[in-house]
Structures are given as structure tokens and as C-alpha cells.
Image: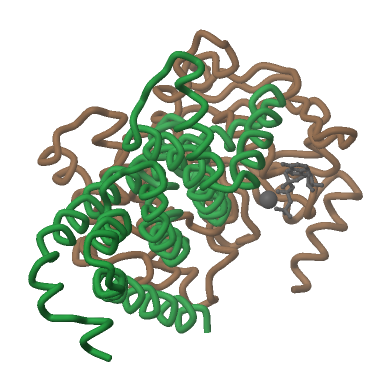
Chain colours: A brown, B green
Amino acid sequence: MARPIVEARGIHKHFGALHVLKGVDLEVAERELVFVIGPSGSGKSTLLRCLNRLEEPSSGSVVVDGIDMLDPKTDINRARQRIGMVFQSFNLYPHMTALGNVTLALRKVAGKSRVEAEALGRAALKRVGLADRAGHTPGQLSGGQQQRVAIARAIALEPRVMLFDEPTSALDPELVGSVLEVMCDLRESGMTMIVVSHEMGFARNAADRVIFMDHGLIVEQGPPVAIFENPSQERTRAFIGQIQRH
Amino acid sequence: MIETFLNPEIIAAIWPIVLAGLANTVLLSLIVVPLGLLGGLIVALLATVHHPLVRWPLMAWVDFFRAFPPLVLLVLLFAGLPFAGLELGGFACVAIAFFLNTGAYYGEILRAGIDSVPVGQIEAARSTGLNRLQAMGYIVLPQAVRNVLPDLLSNTLEVVKLTSLGSVVAVPELLFQARQAQSLTYSPTPIVLVAIVYFLILWPMVRLLSRLENRALASRR
Ligand SMILES: Nc1ncnc2c1ncn2[C@@H]1O[C@H](COP(=O)(O)OP(=O)(O)OP(=O)(O)O)[C@@H](O)[C@H]1O
Ligand SMILES: [Mg+2]
């Protein structure tokens, strides 16, 4: 097997007295889509945030695309360009247009000229189906459109891996589809993705592997069918039963 | 009445003095407002550093200069510094006093503005590789300033009014010039004239402020 793009080993995270991650190992291969589920507070977001060091792990190692993310000598801002992140609440910059959102890091981090950045930015917006919304501010866009701009902002930097933290949880049901569609396209194009979500239908169609987390540990993992239809752990079964009833 | 309080002959005689005062008040404002904003920006940026070695001295600094009456501070600088071998002149003393005093106020306003920007904004910026300073400059500060624009403007209004303190240390701004003219003419007309001039330059700012405040209220509804 080729070297995994994401290699996290023995990740622990404490928030004061709270022990949130209790030794998580996660390897993600190139082009793999890993889907993460688990109860609220089980540490899913914290795990994602440890991968791009938005959160500093208390111990363990994180290597992404061969770069040791926790080495103090690593240029973390350069490394982060290679790891796209999409948030539940979009976090678009409200004082900039969609194109401004997408081009900011291209210009200020990747060092592209304005002309280059705008060409790349428009291409990214086109990929998420929003070529005609480049001049709109986030306030003028629907939730689904905003989240697609957020995806464009991340993919414009040509990341090696994309992290999604509940990308559709803040959306009205009728807007969820448009975002999942973009994520499917991204997967088709070969993007490596780690997705925290409750969208089981998407997981069934698109995920290579489903991970179930509880209390800061990976309890069980496997292909979607195995985890959803025939989990081996009682806790997994209980959780799957619970969300399928909703 | 008019003869006493707005005597046309006196006005004709003293208007060059008042005009010079107006020019100095405007000049003084153009110096102390940016200086105060600069001081405020420094205070607000330092406030984002949570290290105790920055935090406590900064808090003491801000509290001290907010509690210290600006007039006393100004007189202290003007009358006290020469004894420390530093003869600065009225203008420089006003500039320093305003940097310290209004910097503390602008700092508190900007700090509140920075706090009002959701952390998710910073996280999104940092996740794309922007460094701390870039995230502050491109993402946080523009939103922070917009969120506290009425407070910034209101403070600026106070700062412009406070430039009249310069008269105490012989800076020839509006009030100082009016007092000069008054002592030459033995008439209240110069003071009344200057009061009108103050109103005319400050009133548009007050109107703008009301409009901003109303808009902020409307957008909150
Ligand atoms: N910055 C923080 N400071 C203190 N505690 C935190 C912090 N971030 C997260 N936690 C705590 O860590 C635990 C795990 O949080 P995390 O957000 O990773 O869970 P999650 O699995 O993503 O849950 P959810 O499904 O609700 O998003 C929670 O108990 C949370 O309160
Ligand atoms: Mg979460």
C-alpha cells in the first residue's frame, strides 16, 4: 500500500481536566473517503481540528502528505494550504464577495497575483456551480450556496486532503442536496476526504470506510455496509439504531 | 443684545484670529485622532495576547489613563516634564496626552469590536494558511471596526471637543484664540463666535453618528 496521506498516531487531547481524545490512530490513503460518525461530544470535531493543528494535540503525531504537522520547525501556514477545511457554520468572510473569499489565501498565502488568483477563484466557484455568484456577498447567498463557496475557498488552494465538519448540519433540508452533490463531484475527481456527518445516504454511496467514535476513541471501523447493517460492537449498533429512527 | 454678543464690527476685526484658531483646531484634531487610534490599535492588539506578562501591565495601563483626568495629565506633562529636562512645548504635550488618554478609550472600543467577531472567522482564515497577523488584518479588524463604528465616531467627537484643552498650554486653537480676542476687545463676541464655529464643525458629525446609530439599531431588529 502506498504511504497514507494522513497518518495520525496516538492522538490524545485534554481540555483542562477533560480528556477528549484518548489515543486515536487514523490513517487515510490517497483518494480515500473516510466518514466519521459518533455521538455528540465524542471528539469528532476535535480530531479533525488536530489534523490541521487548529487544535494542538496533547500528545501523539500527525503527518499529512509527508509533513510532520506537530514539528515546531514546520511552516504550519504553508502546511495548512494543503489541508482544506469546511465548517458547519460556513465561516465565510461577510465583508467580502464570494470571489474575495476564495481569492484571499491564493493571494496572501500562495502568493498569486490578483489576476491569477481571480482566474483560479472563478474556476473554483465554477466547480461548485456558482460561477454566476462571484460578486455576491455571503449575506446575499442561501446557506447551501454559502457552504459551496466555503468549499470553493478550500479547493482553490489545491489541497491534498479535505476535512468536512458536519458540512450540511446547519442547512435547511432542501439545500443539503446541492452541497452533497458538490462533495460527490469532489470525490469523483479523486480528492481525499475526511467527513464528519450524519448523512448516512451519502456515506453509503460515497464512503470507502466508516469510523464510529465514542468517548474519544475509535470504537469500530469498516466499509459502510458492514458498519450500518452489521456492526460488531453494541455501542455502534445502539448509535446507528438511534440515528436511523430520526 | 446683538451689539454685545455678536457685534459685527468686532467680528470683522477678529475673524482672522478666529480663523487661525480654527485652522489649529483642525490641525490638532488631524494629529490627535490618528494618534489616539494608533494607541488604541496597539492596546487592542496587545489585548489579544493572553500571556499574563502582557495582560496585567496592559490592564493597569488602560485603567490608569482612563482614570486620569486628561486636563491634569496635560498640565502634568507641560509643567512637569521641563523639570525632567524635557521641554516639549504645548503642541507636543497635547499630542502625547491624547495618545495616552484617548488611546486607552479607543483601545477599549476596538477590543470590544475584536471580541464581537466570531472565532470561526479566525479559524477559517487560519485553516487556509493565513498567519495570525494576516487573519487579524484582513478578516478580524475590518469586521471589528464596522461593528463598533458608532462608538468610534462618538469617541472621535469627544476627542475633537477635548482639543480645546490645548488652550491651557497655550496652543493657539479656537478657544485660546477666542480668549485672546476677548481680552483685546473686552467683549463676549469672540467667545460666542467660537461657540458657533464649534457647533458648525461638530454638528455634521453628530448627525452622521445618529444615522449610524439608527442603522445599527435597525439591523439588530
Ligand atoms: N476548546 C474547548 N475547550 C474545552 N472543551 C472543549 C473544547 N472543544 C471541545 N471541547 C469539549 O470536548 C468534547 C468533544 O468535543 P467535540 O466538539 O470534538 O465533539 P463532537 O464529537 O464533534 O461533538 P458534536 O457532534 O456535538 O459536534 C466535548 O465535551 C466538548 O465540550
Ligand atoms: Mg463537532
Relative side of A98 to B102, left or right: left
> For the point 30% across and 56% down, which residue is it?
A96
> For the point 87% across and 37% down, which residue is it?
A18
**A224 versus A52 height, above or below:** below
Q: State which quadrant residue B169 falls in.
A: top left
Which residue is more in the foreground, A232 or A8?
Answer: A8
> For the point 62% across and 44% down, which residue is it?
B68
Q: Does residue A99 appear in this view?
A: yes
Number of on-image labels: 0
**A102 versus A110 height, above or below:** below
Which residue is more in the foreground, B130 or A2?
Answer: B130
Residue B155 % position (x, y): 45, 59
Q: Quadrant of the C terminus of chain A?
A: bottom right
> For the point 42% across and 51% down, which residue is it?
B165
Outermost residue on the bottom side: it is: B1
Residue A197 % position (x, y): 62, 55
Relative side of B43 to B189, left or right: right
Which residue is more in the foreground, B218 or B6?
Answer: B6
Q: State which quadrant residue B95 falls in.
A: top left
Q: Does residue A84 appear in this view?
A: no
Residue A158 % position (x, y): 32, 35
Relative side of A206 to A35, left or right: left
Residue B40 % position (x, y): 47, 42
Relative side of B171 to B38, left or right: left
